[in-house]
Amino acid sequence: MIKQKNKLTIVVSAPSGAGKTTIINRLLAEDNRCEFVISTTTRKARMGEIDGKSYYFISSADFKKKIQNNELIEWSSVHKNYYGITKKEFDRIISIGKIPLFDVDVQGAEKLKNILSRAVFIFIVPPSIEVLKSRLKNRGTDTEEEINTRVQNALKELQKVKSYDYIIINNDLEESLLDFKAILRAELCKTTTVSLKF
């Protein structure tokens, strides 16, 4: 009998507007081996986002308490808001035998590299900066100033791409999803992931 142990964690990053959330949501809907690691944030919920599903939305004061009490695996300040992942959330996913799937910025990914022993890092990028600008405008959630800030941040984040294991260029959603699934399948077949018991 061949028994597969869950020794895998997936960490995904992308510039804002690259389509990361859409790809992750599709993957989670189609592959029940993965479980989304819900981040905690101080930013306001966008339309359609649900507390406890999209994010855990808390106040800045409560977030700072979590930092002081050492309740976070990692945290960072992005676009004037705090984002982080609680130890409690990670433990919840491990306890049900699922593959934790992190959605973090490049700062968070750098920190997780020093924390997670068996993680695969995936960077999702738009086909061009022009496409990124268009997607941000069409999203309709940011002002022109905020869009410009996100584009400038994206240019900085793209310089970190070489520190990731895989890159997915999100020009077409279906193709990008296939790429993501191929990465997951390959990683689950690695000798470091599969435990053989005869």
Image: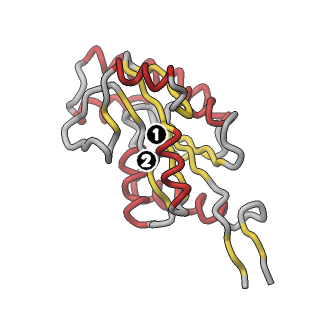
At 35% from the left and 19% from the top, the residue drawn is: 60
Query: Quarter-wise, where is residue 6 in the image?
Result: bottom right
Task: Tell me if I can see residue 179 in this picture.
Answer: no
Q: Give the amino acid type for the residue marked by disc 1 in the picture.
A: Pro
Labels 1 and 2 touching (C-beta < 8 A): yes
In the picture, residue 42 is in which quadrant? top left
Answer above or below: position of 150 versus 124.
above
Marking on residue 171: 2
> Which element carries disc 2, helix, strand or loop?
loop
Q: Amino acid at mark 2?
A: Asn
Dot 2 crowding, Cα within 10 Å, few <14, some 14–19, many 20+: some
Could you tell me which residue is drawn at 24 percent across and 35 percent down?
Answer: 139
Residue 185 at x, y percent in the picture: 61, 65
Indicate whether 192 appears above or below 169.
Answer: below
Mark identifier at residue 127:
1
Front residue (pair 49, 176):
49
In the picture, the quarter occupied by the N terminus is bottom right
- How far is mark 1 from mark 2, CA to CA? 5 Å
Disc 1 packing (10 Å; few <14; some 14–19; many ≥20): some
